[in-house]
Amino acid sequence: MTLFDELLEANASYAQTFPGTELTAMPSRHIVILTCMDARIDNFDAFGLAVGDAHILRNAGGRVTDDVIRSLLLSSDVLGTRYVAIIHHTQCGLWGTTNEAIQQRVRDDRDVDASAIDFRPFQDADESVRDDLARLAASPLLRKDITTAGFVYDVANGRMRPVASAEGNVSPSIARAIEEFRANAGQLGGEYEDVPVLLLHATDADSNTERVTPLTCQPRGDSWAVFASKAGASSDPYWYLNLVAKPQVTIEFGAETIEVTARVVEGAERDEIWEAQKQASPQFARYEASTDRVIPVVVLERR
Ligand code: ZN
């Protein structure tokens, strides 16, 4: 029996108990998963998906190619999807190799010239995800109301983690807020319309790369107070830890970019600023009530 006979046989018993389907061709969760053809990845159980939920596009590496763009156009414009998750993975066959090496192998094995093919190898899975997210964002063909996100899946332990943007943000909504801030001289819309916001550029202590974080602030003449509330969570936000480690940072406020030095304030100075902040934005009182931490207050002084 050949492998194909085995497939036919398996399908015959599947069809015998096939209950029929009421699913339509529109993915019920409006999402596209783009991932590698790697045989170790279960695209259903690993991501909590069932048949009918999602479009699943697979190719070598899970890379954004012209054919992926073709499929995404049909998926979103004809079949209503609005989310795209790009998932690359550890131990990928395209990791750590080069086009030259792959082309050479094909030439050596079979004397075939594959030099016209870009196999899209990569040296860093986070980088390749960011590269492909950028390709989606740059495509003039794709709808602009599609939300994208990138992940790396670890085939050794089954865990998927989000990939941070080049500016250090894992959240597409933060990336959009930064874009909006810069397009409107520091003004955000919606619930932040009347809230002063700055962009903090701080060096991430773990990765030694710069991260940009939008923060609600309290402008105080030539300084700005920011609040490590993390919406009342029990731990300090990463940006606060980064500021304490390296207090010389840059902020964007309005249309201006300003060099500042961070100073954690305490005692009466902190209390005065904190009380004013609760007056201006009542949600800070809720954050205070929901955590045992004394929410750190940091003043960023122009230098
Ligand atoms: Zn792979």
Image: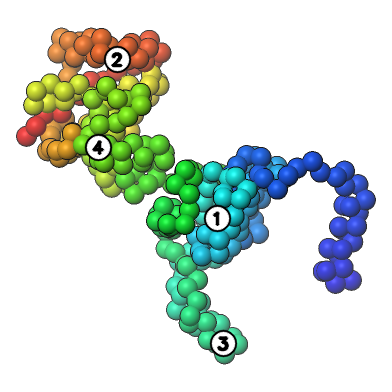
Q: Is mark 2 within 8 Å of ligand 1?
A: no
Q: Kindly state the secondary structure of the residue where label 3 is placed.
A: loop
Q: Position of residue 192 (x, y in %)?
A: 32, 25
Quadrant, the C terminus: top left
Q: Label 1 to label 2, Cα distance in Å?
A: 43 Å
Query: Mark 4 sits on what residue?
Result: 184
Q: Position of residue 179 (x, y in %)?
A: 31, 42
Q: Residues within 10 Å of mark 3 (few under 14, many from 20)?
A: few
Q: Label 3 to label 1, Cα distance in Å?
A: 33 Å
Q: Is residue 107 left or right of residue 139?
A: right
Q: Label 2 to label 4, Cα distance in Å?
A: 22 Å
Query: Mark 2 sits on what residue?
Result: 281
Q: Position of residue 82 (x, y in %)?
A: 54, 43
Comes first in the chain, label 2 or label 4: 4
Q: Which mark is residue 112?
A: 3
- Residue at left 81%, top 43%? 21
Q: Kindly state the secondary structure of the residue where label 2 is placed.
A: loop
Query: Mark 1 sits on what residue?
Result: 73
Q: Residue furthest bottom?
A: 111
* Nearest to viewer (mark 3 / mark 2): 2
Quadrant, the N terminus: bottom right
Q: Amino acid at mark 4?
A: Asn
- Can residue 220 be seen by looking at this rendering? yes
Q: Is mark 4 within 8 Å of ligand 1?
A: no
Image: 103 above or below 57? below
